[in-house]
Image (spheres, rainbow, N blue to C red):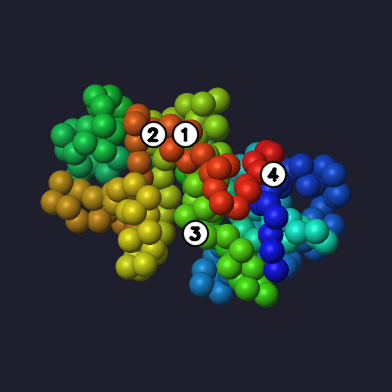
Amino acid sequence: MIILELQIIQLCDLLNEFGEESVRDILADFLCPLNEDVEFFLKHKAILFENMDKSRTYLVFGIDDAKMILVAYFSLTSLPIVFDNSISNKRKKAILRTGFEANSQLSAILIGQFGKNYKNCYNLLITGKDLFDLTMHKVLQVHKLIGGRIIYLECENRPKLRAFYEKVGFELYTDDNGDPIISDTGLLTYMISTKNISLDKYDVRERIHEIMVTA
């Protein structure tokens, strides 16, 4: 199968255009055996959270001559991050790449969900790096509108996941001794300061395969 382009469509736009029942049928095609939480969120929480303005979900479709195929999705939300009390001001400054403010709660954008569709090997139609770049491109568009000092995400303590997020520039959230700080959900946190990143770094529109960002 040859995908001519990838297109991002925001979940709320699909709901407005086709209605909830039809959209649920589209989401039912998503399978992610590597992370059941990613699959469960899209099928059972994404529409509810969209209607409650709790998060925004973006669907990535591959388009060929015949049809649109759901290949991946990601969700974003504006959620402050609170630094652990065990972290020194020096460590906080290192994370932020700038001066630290007295308030330990900082405005931030959370990449809440991020995953590819493994049904019929659709996951092979987009690389993890391309999906992440699409996600970050959208994150930085959101940041331009609402601000935020930190972009962060949570992930399981798996070597392959950790290597991926570190390769794309995210830093493991650790205390002064370099030990990971575990979230309330038992996950690792990776983060990056918005200080030194830009839209250009994640501009994927000139890749070998065409990617069209429309949302």
Considering only vertical position in the picture, is 79 above or below 158?
above
Q: Mark 4 — residue?
A: 10
- The answer to whether the residues at label 3 and label 1 have Cβ atoms under 8 Å apart is no
Tell us which disc is closer to us: 4 or 2.
Answer: 2
Q: Mark 3 vs mark 1: which is more N-terminal?
A: 3
User: Which SS class for mark 3?
Assistant: helix
Tell us which disc is closer to us: 1 or 2.
Answer: 1
Give the amino acid at mark 3. Answer: Gly
Image quadrant in which the C terminus is located: top right
Tell us which disc is closer to us: 4 or 1.
Answer: 1
Question: Which label sits on residue 197?
Answer: 2
User: Which SS class for mark 1?
Assistant: helix
> In the rendered view, does 94 fall on the left or right side of 155?
left
In the figure, residue 17 lies in which quadrant?
top right
User: Which SS class for mark 2?
Assistant: loop
Q: Mark 3 — residue?
A: 128
